[in-house]
Image: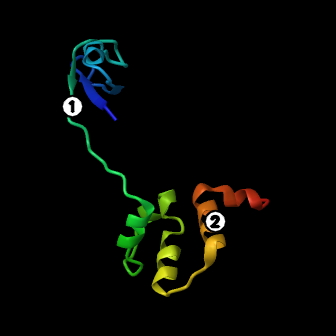
Amino acid sequence: MPIYEYECAKCQAISTFLILRQEDAARVVCKGCGSKKMSQLISRVTYHRSESDRLAEFNTRKPRGEEFYKDSRNVGLWAKKRAKELGADLGPQFDEIVESARTGKILEKYDL
């Protein structure tokens, strides 16, 4: 996605813009103060990892910090990997339960 970050020379605010054409870059203005004096920043780059890649690389024996459990994608990852390591096929119902837990839909089944 062509998403770029710019810093305002006047107020130092950092704003993010979707730039589809070169003409769009010429119309960038600060979202904070409205200044046109903006300079493009070098942003962080990320890449997507599939669930199967994450599962293959996941080490169940490695201790996890608190941050690991704050990511909803990690809910059930340990259980899936451990079941695979033990050779246990828990069937499609297990995957449904894990997905339900990851999305928070499992709470809808209980009166909390």
Q: Residue furthest bottom?
A: 86
Alpha-carbon neighbours of circle 1 within 10 Å: few (<14), some, or many (≥20)? few
Give residue 48's position: percent from left, percent from top: 36, 52
Q: Quadrant of residue 107?
A: bottom right
Q: Nearer the viewer, residue 38 or 89?
A: 89
Residue at left offset 26%, top offset 12%? 36
Q: Please state, as top left, top right, bottom left or bottom right, where the C terminus lies in the image.
A: bottom right
Q: CA distance from mark 1 to mark 2?
A: 42 Å
Give residue 94's position: percent from left, percent from top: 62, 72
Q: Which residue is mark 2?
A: 96
The secondary structure type at the circle numbered 1 is: loop
Frontmost of labels 1 and 2 is 2
Upstream in sequence: badge 1 or badge 2: 1
Residue at left offset 77%, top offset 62%? 110
The secondary structure type at the circle numbered 2 is: helix
Residue 76 sits above or below residue 11 on the image: below
Residue at left offset 64%, top offset 65%? 96
Q: Please state, as top left, top right, bottom left or bottom right, where the N terminus lies in the image.
A: top left
Q: Quadrant of residue 3?
A: top left
Q: Amino acid at mark 2?
A: Glu
Q: Which residue is mark 1?
A: 41
Residue 16 shows which numbered tag? none
Q: Quadrant of residue 23?
A: top left
Q: Is residue 56 left or right of residue 94?
A: left
Residue at left offset 38%, top offset 72%? 56
Residue 12 sits above or below residue 56 on the image: above
Q: Nearer the viewer, residue 60 or 112?
A: 60
Q: Nearer the viewer, residue 52 or 10?
A: 52
Q: Is residue 93 left or right of residue 89?
A: right
Give residue 52's position: percent from left, percent from top: 42, 66
Q: Contact, CB < 8 Å: mark 1 with mark 2?
A: no
Q: Amino acid at mark 1?
A: Leu
